[in-house]
Image (cartoon, rainbow, N blue to C red):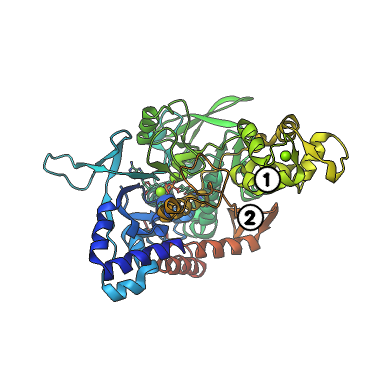
Amino acid sequence: AAAASGGIVAYAGSKFDNTAEQTQVAQKKKMVVLGTGWAGTAFLKNLDYSLYDVKVISPRNYFTFTPLLPSVTCGTVEPRSIVEPIRKIIGKNKLLFNWFFILLSQKGEEIDYWEADCYKINTVGKKVLCRSKIGTNLDGTGEFVVDYDYLVIAVGAQVNTFNTPGVMEHCHFLKEIEDARRIRRSVIDCFEKASLPYLDEEERKKNLHFVIVGGGPTGVEFAAELHDFVAEDLTKLYPAIQDLVKISVIQSGEHILTMFDQRIAEFAEAKFQRDGIDVRTGYRVVKISDNSITMKCKSTGETSEPYGMAVWSAGVGTRPVIVDVMKQIGQENRRVLTTDEWLRVCGCDGIYAIGDCATISQRKVMEDISAIFKFADKDNSGTLTVKEIQDIFEDLCIRYPQLELYLKSKHMSDIADLIRDAKGGDVEKGSMQLDIDELKIALAHVDSQVKSLPATAQVAAQQGQYLAQCFNSMRDCEEHPTGPLRLRDSGRHRFRPFQYKHFGQFAPLGGEQAAAELPGDWISIGHGSQWLWYSVYASKQVSWRTRVLVISDWLRRFIFGRDTSC
Ligand code: FAD
Ligand code: MG
Ligand code: MG
Ligand code: MG
Ligand code: MG
């Protein structure tokens, strides 16, 4: 709503009062957005362009619906069906918010997109240095510099090989649409190779050994997808060699799918065992050569195995441009770029980071305990009554989400329970009073519930949307300083901190079965969950075009099977 009204105000200005528009244009702050993935796209879809002079820079001029990438590797879904041109998405914003005024004035907001990589950010001079791969400028480099007032970094993460020798040269990754295309071609190539007349049995087996390194959601989903592809389509076409196929999932931890509920992990392991997928837990890959993969296990030592194709989906790393920013702003000792709860990068000015490239550093209750006490103690009595605490409780929960998690973990519904706990025993409601030391005891373990958010599309999209809403109402908040939240960080912004809402997660396990973990500890596994998966992922598509394409791909697969020509 804020975005819509902002846009309308700006348009009314341009229609009826030209001088007003000119001053507004002159005052517009320069905003640069890096990246057109989940976070960047969600940001752009929700931003009111009339308020800022926006430049978007990303090496890919499209958005990729990453959750369906594993389906692309086996031809269940076509590559074109899960990408959407960023220029179309940018155009849609105009249509969504300002269609009425576009009809009236025939004029849309300007927003630029440039296909380039940002290779350096100058955090002091407020510039981004970019390089285009598709065209060169006068000095022959394709490099250019863009100034910003606000920089939104949404460049995502890159694969992490943990410096394992041979991974870069011999493994496939599964991160981009081209990766999925390459894997698809490679799977078919392996089958064709194994069918050649001059190979012996050993070599056929080698070519049909598919290795997936990493038992996280991506690796597991790819393994399941590949198994279905082999069982449903390829065995019919390659009957002579069907018994030689082997799929292995190598996982360094004790279990696969560790980020899911244990019941889901167990179900997945059992299903994979029934399907004949070899799950090797406790193995770490140490080297990959042209035709063999070497792994280490604590109990049995090092083993080498021949393979036909390997996919590496173990771990995410930080992009070099982000590592450089971290050095500039004194975050070199951290693993990931760190922001505060408002998604502002700590240690510099005007830079925001969303999605996989950053992590939020949640403030601790115990660090602020004296300030909290003083703030709550409205009558300066030196003690807090239940009412005084209850008055600030909602604010506290917003500022420190760990508090709510802590109460939940203790099966407490109310702050009075916490006080009773701190006082040790039954205290009558009217006479409950806490001094600062008792408050400290009551809240002592709350910070143990601080959790970092997972690197998922869900988090990235919510952060993009939140940040856009902040930018849309920034001017409003500056003009009306009484914000909705009193307990905030020294008045720089008057917005609530980012709050993540978890809507659950899926793990498709093949054979038209999926595992779903929904809010409230609700677990569902089986065919029903697969249908839920279909409907959720159809509804989450960024455009009607991709939605129609994805659904028709699924139908085509149901009727004709997957395409195996590559
Ligand atoms: P990305 O989406 O990776 O976007 C980064 C953008 O930055 C890209 O446009 C890239 O081109 C651009 N970029 C990169 N470098 C530069 C640079 N130097 N300068 C400018 N731009 C740059 N999450 C879920 O929640 N559910 C799922 O089911 C799920 N399945 C997944 C399956 C696969 C195969 C993969 C790989 C991921 C999956 N994820 C899933 C995770 C999800 O895709 C990521 O968490 C999400 O993409 C993060 O969004 P982001 O915007 O931070 O990064
Ligand atoms: Mg992005
Ligand atoms: Mg993406
Ligand atoms: Mg990413
Ligand atoms: Mg008091």
The quarter of the image that holds ligand 4 is: top left
Question: Where is 410 relative to 477, above or below?
Answer: above
The residue at which mark 2 appears reads as 516
Q: Position of residue 337 (x, y in %)?
A: 45, 35
Q: Residues within 10 Å of mark 2 (few under 14, many from 20)?
A: many
Question: Where is 226 relative to 145, above or below?
Answer: below
Left of 240 or right of it: where is 525?
Answer: right
Secondary structure beneath label 1? helix
Residue 245 seen by the camera: no
The residue that appears at 36% across and 65% down in the rendered structure is 9
Q: The residue under label 2 is which amino acid type?
A: Ala
Badge 2 vs badge 1, beta-carbon distance below 8 Å: no
Secondary structure beneath label 2? strand
The residue at which mark 1 appears reads as 404
Q: Position of residue 507 (x, y in %)?
A: 59, 52
Residue 278 seen by the camera: yes
The residue that appears at 42% across and 32% down in the rendered structure is 347
- The quadrant in which the C terminus is found is bottom left
Q: Position of residue 136 (x, y in %)?
A: 16, 44
